Image (cartoon, rainbow, N blue to C red):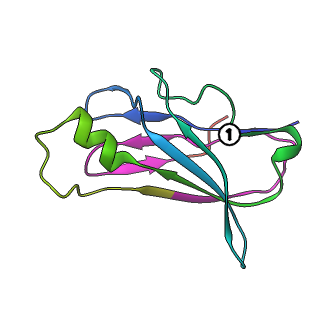
Amino acid sequence: MGKLSTHVLDTSIGKPGQGISIQLYGVSAAKHELLTTRVTNADGRCDEPLLEGETLKVGEYQLEFAIGTYFAKSNPNLPEPAFLNTVVIRFQVANAQENYHVPLVVTPWSYSTYRGS
């Protein structure tokens, strides 16, 4: 059975992004359905997979990371308003039997992602 996980790395300080609120949505033509909300731990990860087993289905998903709030707390010297507020990553699961790891590598001014294992 597959699972979906994520983590956040703050490359502006070279450390995991702790305390970042994450929302996961299922996306279809008709709606966005909120599936779960999590907060990253001290390692920048969620304590358990976002989806696992039968809850992971083939289809489109959207992760939303509240990094504006994170950077406002961790670096109060940044200009207001924040350049990046919410990072949205929309992706598709083609095989629900596989693991999908979707990390976010972020600074106050940039981000990237990739499919990890």
- To which quarter of the image does residue 49 belong? top right
Front-most of residues 48 and 110:
48
Which residue is most to the bottom? Answer: 30
Q: Which quadrant holds the N terminus?
A: top right
Vertical comparison of 17 with 37: above or below: above
Front-most of residues 27 and 9:
27
In the image: residue 40, left or right of residue 37: left
Q: Position of residue 81 (x, y in %)?
A: 18, 58
Q: Residue at point 22% right, 55% down?
A: 82
Q: Residue at point 81% right, 47% down?
A: 56
Q: Residues within 10 Å of mark 1 (few under 14, many from 20)?
A: many
Vertical comparison of 50 with 44: above or below: below
In the image: residue 116, left or right of residue 17: right
Specify start and end residues of the magenta stretch as a single range. Answer: 89-113
- To which quarter of the image does residue 2 belong? top right
Front-most of residues 67 and 95:
67
Give yes or no for residue 23 being in the magenta stretch: no
Q: Which residue is mark 1?
A: 50
Q: How many marks?
A: 1
Q: Amino acid at mark 1?
A: Leu
Q: Position of residue 117 (x, y in %)?
A: 67, 34
In the image: residue 96, left or right of residue 81: right
Say which element carries label 1: loop
Q: Residue at point 23% right, 42% down?
A: 72
Give yes or no for residue 94 being in the magenta stretch: yes
Q: Residue at point 12% right, 51% down?
A: 79
Q: Position of residue 13 (x, y in %)?
A: 26, 28
Q: Position of residue 87 (x, y in %)?
A: 43, 55
